[in-house]
Image: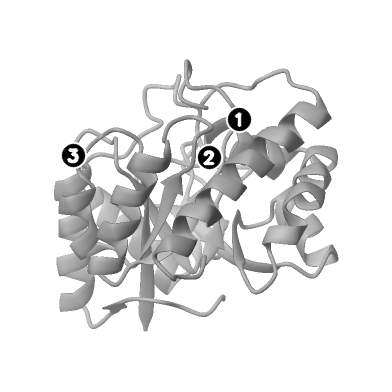
Amino acid sequence: MRIDMNCDVGEGVENEHLMMPYISSCNIACGGHFGDATTIDKTMQLAIDNGVKIGAHPSFPDTENFGRKWMKISNDALQKSIENQMDLFLERLSFFNEKIHHIKPHGALYNAIAKNEEFATLFIKITEKYLKDVFLYVPYQSKIEEVALKYGVNIKYEAFADRNYTNELTLVSRQHKNALLVDENEVLQHVLSMIKYQNVKTISGDIKNIKAATFCVHSDTQNALEMVKYLHQNLIKLGYTIGETTNI
């Protein structure tokens, strides 16, 4: 079985060159929470050199909070910001003669469209023109999944290797002490449970069904490099291939 490992990159952590050999798709910050033409170009080149699928990582226009806090913003302002981010991303990508593989919203924007149908619909309407023959990474049983399928968008279910889940299959808030998973073997077992049994143990200790075709490790998790290397090496030992997947 093929397992897609993805990572949020181009976010100023400067570990992309170390992470790329162990992942198969990446989400490049395109100016909302971080990034400019220089960082986008540098990250795209690294992805190409390592055969990693290239995706856009748009965000609320909030560099101050790294896009991880809900932002009160008008629909028109959000549309303009996302369009500016996507247009910059695609402009830079055209210089490499490469195609965009997917779009994955970042941080608070990702969480908002996962929970709120109206906001999810707004996001799809804004990005619909960019989503032709492009995947949208979405969480399983989310509002954005429902809306995307309604609009005929190609989705790929995403789960998080380094984050704990609530009973509602949302990510535990980063304000909670147990939001992050950092023990490498615990992360591996977390991922294997989702791969083999399509379930996840929530922070409450319950077992919930979940589907995922791509798994994210955040590049700014404290031991991100060690974690992604451990996952890569052990998944291969267990007979999995790290690479492009179909959805589940």
Task: In this rendered view, identify the residue nearer to me: 9 or 81.
Answer: 81
Under mark 3, the amino acid is: Asn
Q: Quadrant of the N terminus?
A: bottom left
User: 117 left or right of 168?
Assistant: right
* Real-space CA distance between mark 2 and mark 3, rounded to the nearest whole angstrom: 20 Å
Label 2 secondary element: loop
Q: Position of residue 181 (x, y in %)?
A: 31, 39
Q: Residues within 10 Å of mark 1 (few under 14, many from 20)?
A: many
Under mark 1, the amino acid is: Phe
Q: Which residue does the numbered mark 2 point to in the structure image?
A: 106
Q: Is residue 174 visible?
A: yes
x 41%, y 73%: residue: 196
Q: Earlier in the sequence, mark 1 or mark 2?
A: 1
Task: In this rendered view, identify the residue nearer to me: 70 or 73.
Answer: 73
Q: Which residue does the numbered mark 3 point to in the structure image?
A: 223
x 70%, y 41%: residue: 113
Label 3 secondary element: loop
Label 1 secondary element: loop
Q: Residues within 10 Å of mark 2 (few under 14, many from 20)?
A: many
User: 70 left or right of 217?
Assistant: right
| Tag of residue 60 | 1
Q: Quadrant of the C terminus?
A: bottom right
* Real-space CA distance between mark 1 and mark 2, rounded to the nearest whole angstrom: 8 Å
Task: In this rendered view, identify the residue nearer to me: 68 or 3.
Answer: 68
Q: Position of residue 127 (x, y in %)?
A: 72, 52
Under mark 2, the amino acid is: His
Q: Quadrant of residue 11?
A: top left
- Which numbered mark, 2 or 3, is in the foreground of this view? 2
Q: Does the CB distance between marks 1 and 2 fall below 8 Å?
A: yes
Q: Does the CB distance between marks 1 and 3 fall below 8 Å?
A: no
